[in-house]
């Protein structure tokens, strides 16, 4: 996928103000950003559901501004809001969607992959919010897509369901499926994404691997320990030296020692706040 200079306005609102992206086949790419940053607008343009004002876009070799049916069949899309036929069962719904695609996955296998085996015979309206979301994911992958768009896929999932979902995404990526997701969960981005882009006010504020985004790996470490009943902390570029000195001072074990670097969330918040105060 290749995007150059993508821009979109809604009247006076600049939703997307010149975005470049390159996403490789088989890559898991996460778009992060605060509410209203332009994530959904960007993703909807890439999906062929929204027009753009400017820029060049190629998704699976096609301009999504001129979508074809054959191109759509190669995409899997999981939208933010579900509008499933509530009276059908999970199995009926997944089977029905399978008929839209030339080479669908096996419906029962897909139901198992999203962890809904026990609910396969239940009507959609009887499912919990998180279970409905899993149906959405099932419908997004039933067509054996080459590229999957996931808009906040795990909102409403319990922790176990989120872990199962992460495993599913890993296995799809392992099969060579490209995955573009938006999420507000920084731990999700860290667990899943090969690369992330932080979008703020319609522009990319930073892009890179979660471990090194925004200079994260090179950021100062915080060494903390307990001394005389008080928690002490030092921010340093040389945590190893600090720990060695402390170890000598305490003659061995350092009480309640921790060494931490900024989390992805710390870096994200810095980037987003920096962009807002521009
Ligand atoms: N159909 C529309 N008409 C007018 N303005 C819109 C429309 N859709 C989005 N916007 C505006 O464009 C900006 C970007 O919205 P967008 O939905 O792309 O943000 P987002 O990053 O996906 O946010 P969220 O995290 O809340 O989903 C916002 O200021 C929003 O109010």
Image: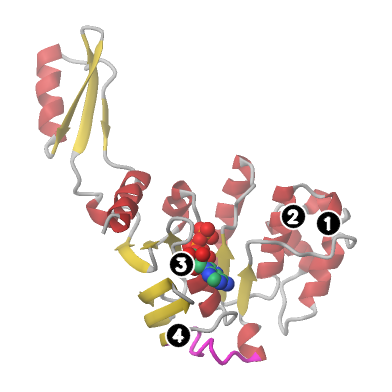
| Residue in view at x 17 percent, y 33 percent | 235
Q: Residues under labels 2 and 1: Cα distance? A: 7 Å
Q: Quadrant of residue 224?
A: top left
Q: Position of residue 177 (x, y in %)?
A: 54, 72
In the rendered structure, the answer to whether residue 207 lies left or right of residue 40 reads: left
Q: Position of residue 155 (x, y in %)?
A: 60, 51
Mark 3 or mark 4: name the one nearer the start of the chain: 3
Q: Up-down: is 25 above or below 219? A: below
Mark 2 or mark 1: name the one nearer the start of the chain: 1
- Residue that carries the numbered disc 2 in the rendered image: 132
Q: Residues under labels 2 and 4: Cα distance? A: 35 Å
Magenta-colored stretch includes residue 66: yes
Stretch of the chain drawn in magenta: 56-68
Q: How is the image coloured?
A: secondary structure
Q: Up-down: is 161 above or below 210? A: above
Of tags 1 and 3, which is closer to the observer?
3
Q: Residues under labels 1 and 4: Cα distance? A: 38 Å
- Residue that carries the numbered disc 3 in the rendered image: 38
Instruction: Determine the secondary structure under disc 3.
Output: loop
In the rendered structure, the answer to whether residue 201 lies left or right of residue 160 reads: left
Pointer 1 residue Cβ closer than 8 Å to ligand 1: no
Mark 1 or mark 4: name the one nearer the start of the chain: 4
- Residue that carries the numbered disc 4 in the rendered image: 53
Q: Residues under labels 3 and 4: Cα distance? A: 14 Å
Of tags 3 and 2, which is closer to the observer?
3
């Amino acid at each position: 996928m290749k995007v150059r200079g993508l821009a979109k306005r809604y009247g006076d609102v600049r939703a997307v103000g010149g975005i470049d992206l390159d996403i490789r086949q088989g890559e898991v790419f996460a778009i992060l950003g605060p509410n209203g940053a332009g994530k959904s607008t960007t993703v909807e343009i890439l999906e062929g559901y929204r027009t753009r004002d400017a820029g060049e876009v190629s998704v699976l070799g096609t301009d999504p501004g001129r979508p074809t049916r054959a191109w759509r069949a190669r995409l899997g899309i999981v939208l933010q809001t579900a509008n499933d036929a509530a009276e059908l069962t999970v199995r009926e719904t997944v089977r029905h969607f399978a008929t839209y695609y030339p080479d669908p996955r096996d419906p029962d296998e897909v139901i198992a992959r999203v962890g809904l085996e026990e609910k396969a015979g239940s009507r959609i309206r009887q499912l919990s919010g998180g279970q409905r979301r899993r149906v959405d994911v099932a419908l997004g992958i039933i067509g054996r897509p080459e590229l999957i768009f996931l808009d906040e896929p795990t909102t409403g999932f319990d922790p176990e369901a989120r872990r199962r979902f992460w495993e599913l995404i890993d296995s799809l990526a392992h099969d060579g499926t490209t995955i573009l997701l938006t999420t507000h969960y920084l731990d999700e981005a860290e667990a899943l994404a090969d690369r992330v882009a932080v979008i703020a006010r319609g522009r990319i504020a930073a892009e890179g691997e979660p471990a090194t985004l925004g200079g994260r790996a090179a950021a100062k470490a915080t060494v903390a320990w307990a001394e005389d009943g008080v928690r002490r902390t030092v921010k340093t570029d040389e945590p190893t030296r600090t720990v060695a000195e402390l170890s000598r001072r305490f003659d061995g074990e350092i009480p309640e020692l921790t060494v931490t670097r900024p989390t992805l969330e710390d870096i994200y918040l810095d980037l987003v706040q920096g962009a807002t105060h521009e």
